[in-house]
Image (cartoon, rainbow, N blue to C red):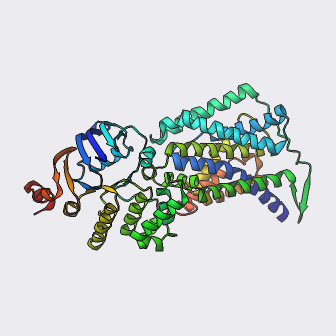
Amino acid sequence: MLMVFLQQALNGIILGCIYALIALGLSLIFGILEVANFAHGEFYMLGAFMALFSMSGLGVSFFPALLIAMIGMGIIGAIIERAVFRPIVGKPLINSMLLSFGLSTALANLALLLFGADPQKIESGLADYHLRFFGLHLTAERLMVLVVGVALVTLLAWFIQSTRTGKAMRAVSQDRVAAQLAGINVSRIYTVTFAISGALAAAAGTMVGAMFFVSPEMGFSVTLKCFIIIALGGFGKIRGVIVAAVMIGLAESLGGGFISYAYKDAYPFLLLVLLFMLKPQGLTGGSGR
Amino acid sequence: MLLSVKGLSAHYGRVQALSSVDIDAPEGSIVTLIGANGAGKSTFMMAVSGVLRSISGEIEYDGRRIDGLPSDEIVRLGLSQCPEGRRVWPGMTVLENLEMGAFQVGDATLVRDRLMRVYAHFPILEQRSAQLAGSLSGGEQQMLAIGRALMSGPRLLMLDEPSLGLAPIVVEHLVEIIREIRNSGTTIILVEQNAFMALGLADAAYVLETGRVALSGKASELLKNDMVRKSYLGV
């Protein structure tokens, strides 16, 4: 029983890493542009397809394909920011909600039209290596997801904390007008934010495509879960979002293992309802940023 | 003229905030704008800084038109604003706030020099450099906001209500600092509700009323003007 618990907890943490990559991008976009991007799950889906086709079309191996997907979605993210979101920055939130819902549907259906509905798998070549320790079981593939996920999240945290562009991103999110007056090119920061978020989502999609499947509709539920995560973790708080992502991953994995797998998508929402009843100020409290 | 504004009008939606305002700032001077709340003083500043875009009229800085330029371009040309209400980034440290003030400055030694100069003006900022800006007192935040505006190395510094909410003794210190900044060669436009302080400090003054220039002239003369004395000095 304990072993099953630990095994499910390990799987939950790996899932949490994936969610953290997607939710951090969503949270950056929300904090810096003050728009809600309901098409974020489609960035993740398109990134996964990009990796899949790099491998089948260009014949590259898994890690170069991961890199290609990240760069590709970074560029597409930047283009989408300029073309779609730029005109509505500063408008009420409902504008970006409706717009991005539309974009989400359009991208998912475009993918369905072009790539077909059949789930496809990305072969990382790591799934056949098994690691066993303390009675727990882990494939090399899942270990890779854990390592890449933690590395990317750490890299992002460092970037935002220490680089000039990262500091400018924080400045824009805390006071846009003050950032303009300091000579920060705010539009450029918007583009960079979308590029980073797109790249992170693509990395997550590629790794999920290796562990599970790639399909045009894989983005929908992920977008909603990631909105829960940033609501739980506190908008714009990196550490809060990471904690919340792991919590959601654990809830899904443990709930699926011990209660019923059929309701695995419901557990994160139950957790949200519970948390808002017990701790309405959010995980990290109401004060601070 | 370092800054020459002609016929500047601005509006928020359908509300006219400035109508055909002419204001000049000669190089090396302190020019003050005084007026009640809502007279259009901050609107003027935001229009010159390129933050407020719905404007008409001409803004000429150092011989070239800058109306319509993006705000970061205007900062690069040497025009910097310390906005009303301080607007420091509360979740960033004092040092990070100052560094971001020099966002356009590529040269690290130059940034270092300016940082030292800001610390010389406001020693408290050096002591608090690792603290979050949101944890500073109001007066310290005001010093930080001015310091941040100086980090870009402006030729023209615009200060919007720097004395607001400060204790009288801090205001005195502020007056000294503003003089020092001017004496080091920076032209200053000072927006103030504290008309007494502003007129004592400035060379030229403009009185704004509901978006128009109601009166202008030498600051020393406006200090003696009956209308100014009654409406803004309370004597």
Residue for point 79% across, 31% down:
A118
At which x and y percent is residue B34? 21, 54
At which x and y percent is residue B219? 17, 57
Q: In the displayed structure, would residue A50 be above or below residue A193?
A: above
The answer to which of B98 and A262 lies nearer the viewer is: B98
Left or right side of B120 for A248: right
- Can residue B88 be seen from the camera position used here? yes
Left or right side of A166 for B227: left
Residue B29, by quadrant, is bottom left
The answer to which of A54 and B192 lies nearer the viewer is: B192
**Going by the picture, which residue comes out furthest to the left?**
B226
The quadrant in which the N terminus of chain A is found is bottom right
How many numbered markers are drawn?
0
Residue for point 30% across, 46% down:
B3
**Going by the picture, which residue comes out furthest to the top?**
A113
At which x and y percent is residue A50? 75, 36
At which x and y percent is residue A194? 60, 43
- Can residue B165 be seen from the camera position used here? no
The answer to which of A119 and B208 lies nearer the viewer is: B208
Residue for point 7% across, 56% down:
B226
Left or right side of B37 for B67: right
